Amino acid sequence: MSESLVIRTFGGFSMTYGDKTISDQDNRSKKLWIILEYIIAFHDRNIPQSTIIDLIWNEESVSADPENALKTALHRIRGMIDELELPEKKTVIRKQGTFSWNKTISCEYDFEDFIALYNKAIAGEKTDEERIDLLIRAFELYKGEFLPKCSTESWASNLATRYLNIYEKLVNELAQLLVKYERYTEVTDICGKAASLDPLDENINFYLVLGLYKSGNQHKAIEQYKRITDVYYNEFGIDSPDRFQKLFDEITSHQSGYEADLKSIQGDLYEKNAEKTAYYCDYSVFQHFYKIQARSCERNGMSIFLMLLTIRNKDKLSDDKEQIKQAMDKMQTVISQALRSSDIYSRYSINQFIAMLPTACYENSLLIGERVLKRFDSTRPNLKVSVSFAVKYLEPQMFDHSDEY
């Protein structure tokens, strides 16, 4: 039997001694777990009784006799810990109006080991291999958010943010070291796990795409690139960072030493499983289409119009992002079905779509916009948003002819 009490806080709270475990997944009062987890998080302090009373029995949860309620809670917490059959029975000590964890109990705290390993890895003179080993050990301790059942508590949220920031730095430094030694399979494995816990971190996703590409999984690298690009659009309304585009260009570029014929190239370019809907693309791709059309529309005599669709909350003072997100999802479906399969459109911002309409005249563009709005109105129950559109003629590209002779 292990002589230490093993305490886990990342991804969930648990206490294990030998083959006995208690965890906050057990069907017990949430208040009991909050008190115990608070005491563990600050196990090196003597915590005033008033602090715990304020933590649990605040204005929204009034107790007629909070001191007596706390005594009862403490008795129940000790009973929970007794299930572990620790040799030391006095675990939570109450003395002179304070509570504290019994410091004589030998404990392994994952959050302290996590910090210690990371600090050791970045401090002092060490070989790269030693740093990699320490960073991997720290990485393996982080199983998810710090005390997730207490995520609504400000003290736990602040600590969770601190540990997540360290985790992001850790993964970035570890990935850089592994890339340096071309250990791309490990990069993929580590960043894949990290992305499942922290899906929006730029560095984690960049090294995941790089690791997939360099380890020979080009197809999966492209899929991951497209996924993170969509996330940036949906969450932030922005393009993915430039280095993602450069990496994507490298992945999809012509490989050295390989010669293709037109048939194989056309097979690669052919759109598989295509649906007869308008063509959606990233805004960076839309910009390329725009430049091509601007260069050619004057010569071929085509009339092309841009249409910008904007969604806003009906209440101008409201900042209901979830309403906007739902409306944008519905609008994307409507646009794809209302426009022709040869038309292209893109998400321009968090609440706007832009489309390119090859059509005969301005009036036709207005009719298309009205058709989109009408279809959207018929598919948006319970969404308190307003939708508007604007249409503008695509002006031909002007060229500098000063060098011509």
Image: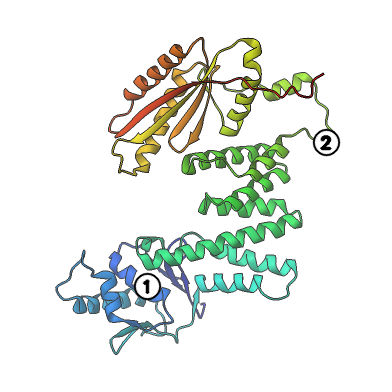
Q: Which mark is residue 38?
A: 1
Please name the residue shown 55% across and 69% down the image.
Answer: 114
Q: Earlier in the sequence, mark 1 or mark 2?
A: 1
Question: Residue placed farthest to the bottom in the image?
Answer: 96
Asked if residue 194 lies left or right of residue 248, the reply is left
Q: Amino acid at mark 2?
A: Ser
- Which mark, residue 256? 2
- Measuring from the top left, give residue 65's x and y in whole percent: 16, 76
* Element assignment for label 1: helix
Specify whether residue 92 is in view: no
* Relative vertical location of residue 124 with respect to residue 241 in this rendering, above or below: below
Instruction: State yes or no: discs 1 and 2 in contact (Cβ < 8 Å).
Output: no
Estimate the x, y position of residue 128 in percent, counting from the top left. Answer: 74, 66
Query: How dense is the environment of label 1, judged by Cα within 10 Å: few (below 14), some, or many (20 and up)?
Result: some
Rendered location of residue 283, percent (x, y): 56, 33
Q: Is residue 213 above or below residue 269?
A: below
Tell me the distance, in whole angstroms, between the alpha carbons under discs 1 and 2: 58 Å
Name the colour scheme: rainbow
Q: Nearer the viewer, residue 228 or 360?
A: 360
User: Residue 293: where, in percent of width, then height?
Assistant: 62, 20
Badge 1 amino acid: Tyr
Residue closest to the far left: 64
**Which dot marks residue 30?**
none
On the image, which quarter does residue 79 sit in? bottom left
**102 over 398 or under it: above or below:** below
Q: Is residue 4 left or right of residue 93?
A: right
Residue depicted at 61% across the width and 23% down the height: 272
Residue at (61% x, 72% y) in the render:
119
Looking at the image, is 74 positioned above or below residue 292? below
